[in-house]
Image (cartoon, helix red, strand yellow):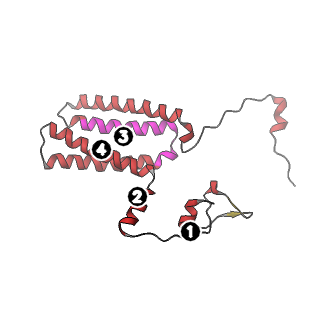
Amino acid sequence: MDQHAQRHGARAARSHGTVEPEHGATTDAPALPRASGMAGMKERARHLPATVTLPIITALAFGCFIIFRTHTAGIKGGPAMLYGLAGAVVSGVLGLLVAHFQSTMITETRAAAYGALFGCSMGWAYSLGGEAILKSCAFGLTMGAVMFVASLYIFRTHRVREPHGLHRPHEHHRHRGDRAHRLPVATH
């Protein structure tokens, strides 16, 4: 039985008396009581998916990097913290959006989305150090291209982990004499 279904007490979509988990079917198990307070927060934190935790952790690290970058450029105190907060919030929201919709994207589009997010973030962070706009754009474009190639390599070599699975293998072209084998079987 599906553990997720047993935890949340959802009902199953039944077909001929069987539960089909590949279609999202669940069981009729009763809901387990939830803990409250700190124990409840720990329990909920354990069940956060990686598509939520990784963008949040990355956004916090990016916000700290922005604070460091602006502080070394001469911006002190509150304004450096505001730049860091703005960078963390914007990159976190965009990262959550990309991570949420990545399962609907094909491999190249997903790699382009990660490359664009990383390139824009790095270009903006580079410009905070007082660099020229053209130089910052070139740096961001270069970093985005590097991220595109790296993520495309990772997505192509780890196809088992892709949310949409392996690509369908191409069928070999058959001769015209094999046409009768492709016709559907007659049903009565």
**Disc 2 on helix, strand or loop?**
helix
Task: Give the label on residue 117, or none.
Answer: 3
Kind of residue indicated by mark 3: Leu
- In the rendered structure, the answer to whether residue 18 lies left or right of residue 140 reads right
Residue drawn at x 28%, y 31% is 137
Label 1 environment density (alpha carbons within 10 Å; few <14, some 14–19, many ≥20): some
- Residue highlighted by disc 2: 45
Q: Nearer the viewer's eye, disc 1 or disc 3?
A: 1
Residue that badge 4 annotates: 61
Work out how far the residue at label 2 is from the one at label 1, CA to CA, in angstroms. Answer: 20 Å
Residue, far right: 188
Question: Picture quarter containing residue 141?
Answer: top left
Q: Residues within 10 Å of mark 3 (few under 14, many from 20)?
A: some
Give the farthest residue toward the front. Answer: 39
Q: Secondary structure at mark 4?
A: helix
* Residue kind at label 1, given as amino acid type: Gly
Q: Earlier in the sequence, mark 3 or mark 4?
A: 4
Tell me the SS state at disc 3.
helix
Task: Point out the tag, 2 or 4, that comes first from the N-terminus.
Answer: 2
Residue range (magenta): 101-125
Q: Earlier in the sequence, mark 1 or mark 3?
A: 1
